[in-house]
């Protein structure tokens, strides 16, 4: 809600931090409201350049590098991009469902500074660091997402493990 013209009005700005609804256990990742919100974040905040990534919120002005808000709703933020990847990891039902978050991790790795850590955000056209660089929060979230990915991948691969033919012939009681 925002105070406007002497009254409270719903703020309908698409905002990436709404990821917290499932991250902090307010709602399950499977909840249709979470799914709709994350779909809106993916569609409305995706940076439509070769760099890609997710902006903080629609028409983000902080260190804005482009006035083309339809194509670049804001600069790509490392943590916002990772939040979407975390949701995709959570929702994955097969190892193949992890392809997009894996590609996100690989792409973000290309933005690492010489010491290996990540900036707060990157330029939407050429990927150079913008604002705080390095940003420990970005780097820590990257490591957290890699851990989520590895755990989920291991879980999905072990669940999908095929029972060898010889095990099928053992008469289990």
Image (cartoon, grey):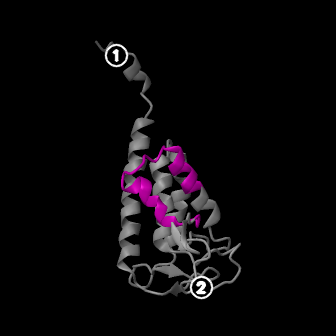
Name the residue tied to disc 1.
Answer: 170
Residue name at image x 55 percent, y 55 percent: 37
Q: Look at the image and give the residue range highlighted in magenta.
A: 12-39
Disc 1 to disc 2, C-alpha distance: 65 Å
**Residue 98 — which label?**
none
Image x and y of residue 72, in percent = 66, 75
Image x and y of residue 125, in percent = 65, 81
172 lies above or below 1: above
Residue name at image x 54 percent, y 69 percent: 7
Task: Tell me if residue 73 is in the magenta stretch.
Answer: no
Callout 2 environment at 10 Å: few (<14), some (14 to 19), or many (20+)? some
Image x and y of residue 171, in percent = 33, 12
Instruction: Say which quarter of the image contains residue 170.
Output: top left
| Quarter of the image where the C terminus is located | top left
Pick whichever, 73 or 48, lies toward us.
Answer: 73
Q: Secondary structure at mark 2?
A: loop
92 lies above or below 70: above
The answer to whether the residue labelled 1 contacts the one labelled 2, judged by CB atoms less than 8 Å apart, is: no
138 lies above or below 93: below
Mark 1 or 2 closer to N-term? 2
Q: Residue furthest left?
A: 173
| Residue depth check, mark 1 versus mark 2: number of the one nearer the observer | 2
Can you see residue 104? Answer: yes
Pick whichever, 87 or 107, lies toward us.
Answer: 87
Image x and y of residue 16, in percent = 51, 65
Can you see residue 56? Answer: no
Callout 1 environment at 10 Å: few (<14), some (14 to 19), or many (20+)? few
Name the residue tied to disc 2.
Answer: 64
């Amino acid at each position: 809600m925002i105070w406007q013209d002497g009254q409270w009005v719903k703020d309908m700005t698409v905002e990436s931090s709404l990821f917290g609804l499932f991250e902090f256990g307010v709602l399950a990742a499977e909840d249709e409201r979470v799914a709709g919100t994350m779909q809106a974040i993916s569609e409305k905040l995706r940076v439509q350049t070769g760099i890609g990534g997710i902006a903080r919120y629609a028409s983000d002005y902080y260190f804005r590098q482009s006035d083309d808000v339809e194509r670049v709703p804001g600069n790509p933020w490392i943590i916002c991009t990772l939040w979407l990847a975390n949701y995709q990891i959570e929702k994955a039902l097969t190892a193949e469902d992890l392809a997009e978050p894996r590609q996100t991790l690989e792409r973000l790795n290309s933005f690492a500074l010489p010491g290996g850590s990540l900036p707060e955000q990157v330029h939407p056209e050429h990927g150079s660091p913008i604002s705080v660089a390095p940003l420990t929060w970005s780097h820590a979230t990257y490591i957290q997402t890699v851990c989520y990915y590895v755990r989920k991948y291991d879980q999905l691969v072990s669940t999908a493990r095929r029972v060898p033919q010889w095990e099928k012939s053992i008469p289990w009681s």
